Amino acid sequence: MKRRQLLSAAGASAVAAGTGALAAPHPAAAATYSGYAMGYFTESPTMAAADYNLHLAVSADGLNWTPLNQNNPVARPTLGSTGLRDPFILRKQNGGFVVLATDLKGTDWAYQSQYLHVWDSADLRSFTGYRLLKVHSLATHAWAPEAFWDASRGRYGVVYSAVTGGRNVLMVNWTGDFRTASAPQIFFDAGYDAIDGSFVTVNGVNYMYYKNNTNSTLLGTRSGSFDPGSFSVYTGAIGPGRGVEAPNIVKHNTADTWYMWGDTWSPNGRFFCWQSTDVGGGSWSLLGDRAYTQPLNSKHPGLTPITGAELSALTGAWGTPAWNRLKSYNFPDRYVRHADNVARIDVYPFDPYQDQQWRLEPGLADPAGVSFRSVNFPNMYLRHADYALVLATNDGTTQFRADATFYRTAGFADSSWTSFRSYNVADRYIRHSGYVLRIDPITSGSTATDRQDATFKVTY
C-alpha cells in the first residue's frame, strides 16, 4: 500500500489545538428537509446477499425505504480490507456530505484496522476523495464510526469503538477536514463492553445512544457538551425482546417526533424502529412491522435528512428498483415469495432472497391489470390453478394469461394498501391461508381476518 494513500493522525496536536492550515467550515445552508437518505451494507441468512460496499436508499417519510441503483453498491472501498461495514453519512457545515465506514470486509472479527474509510460527496450522487483516515495506533479495531459538529471546538468529533483496558470503549478524534485527526481520547467508558455510539442534539442538549455489548440492548446518555467523559446514562435498557445494536436517531421532518432505528447483529437479523416525542424523557415506543419497511437485506443503517430536491435528484440519478416486494398486512414481518413453485408468505429475512422479488408487469390478459413475474425465474409467473396460487412457466395460452392477471384495488383492510382481484374469477381475490396464497371470494362483508388476509403493501 502506497504511503501517500494513507492519511495519518501524525501532527494531530496542531489540529487538536486548533492550529494548522485548516479552512474554517462554512455554516450549513438553511434548508427545509423533506426526505432521508440511508447508507448500509447487505447480508442475508446464508450470506447470498453479502456485499460489503456502500449502498443507498431514500425515503420521503423516514419509515418506508426505496433502495437505489437496484440495491447495488454506489461506492466501493479499494484500500485496507477492501470492504466496509457500518456506513455513516454526515452533512458537513458547508452543506456537503462525508461518508465514514468501518474498514472490515465480511465477518473476520479478528481483523484489526486502525483506519476508517472516508468519502466526500457534494450530493450523494458522486463520491470523491476516497481515502483511509488513521484514528489510532492501538492493536485493536475502529468500529462503527459516527461524527458530529462541535461548535465550541470548531471541529468535528469522530467517535468509534476500540478495545482498551480489556473492553470496547467509545473513542473520539477531532478533525476539521476528515483528512487528518487529533490523537484519540476515550470519549465514553461504560465500565463494560460498549459500541455503536450515535448522536443527536435537541434543545441544546447532546444525546448519545449506544449498545451495551454484554446483553445487546441500547442505552441513552446525555451531556451539555461534547467533552470526553461528560456523558451520563439517563435511560433504562431498550430492546425489542431480542439482541439489537446500531442505534441511529433522526427527527421527523414535519412533526415533533423522533425515530430510532436499530439492527440485529446476525445475518438473520432485521431492523427495528422506535418512536418518541420527547428524546429528553428517554421513553421510546417500538413500532410494529406494518409501520416501516427496510431496504432489502440492509444492515447497520446510517441516516441523514435531505431536501426534496436532493431526494428527487438521487432517485433520478440512481433509479428505483425494477422489482417490488409484497408485504402481508396482518403478518407484516412476512413477504410474498415462491418456494417449490408454491406462493406463500414467509418471515423476512430468508434465502434465496430473490424469491420475494417480483416484476409487476402489465397484465398478460389485460394491460390494465398486473401480472407477477418472478425475478429469479423470469419465464415464470404467479397464476391460480384450482384456486391455489402457484409459480408456473408462461405457456402462451389464453388460459394462462387469464389465470396470471389480476386487478389492483384499494386494500380491504386499509385503503392505502392493495388487494388483487382475479381477472377471470371476478369475485375472488389473492389472500393467504395458513401462509399459502390462493384466491377466495372476499367482500366488504367478509370477516375482518379474510379482509386482512387479502391486503398487501407493494413495496421494495
Image: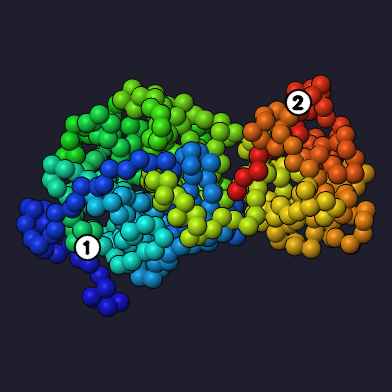
Given residues 423 and 158, the one toward you in this image is 423
Look at the picture and state if 227 lies above or below 401: above
SS at mark 1? loop
Location of mark 1 (residue): 179
Q: Amino acid at mark 2?
A: Thr
Question: Can residue 318 be seen in the rendering of this structure?
Answer: yes
- Quarter where residue 153 is shown: top left
> Counting other residues with Cα less than 10 Å from the Cα at mark 2, is it few (<14), some (14-19), or many (20 or more)?
few
Outermost bottom residue: 2
Q: CA distance from mark 1 to mark 2?
A: 58 Å
Q: Callout 1 environment at 10 Å: few (<14), some (14 to 19), or many (20+)?
A: some
**In x, y percent, where is residue 80?**
35, 68
Of the image marks 1 and 2, the number of the one nearer the N terminus: 1
Residue type indicated by callout 1: Arg
Q: Quadrant of residue 376?
A: bottom right
Q: Which residue lies at the image location 37% right of the left edge and 64% below the top edge?
A: 127
- Estimate the x, y position of residue 129 in percent, counting from the top left: 30, 67
Residue at left offset 71%, top offset 33%: 411
* Picture layout, residue 60 above or below residue 7: above
The location of residue 18, given as percent across then percent down, is 8, 53
Residue designated by label 2:
449
**Disc sitting over residue 86 in the figure:** none
Residue depicted at x 17% and y 50%:
155
Residue 46 located left or right of residue 436? left
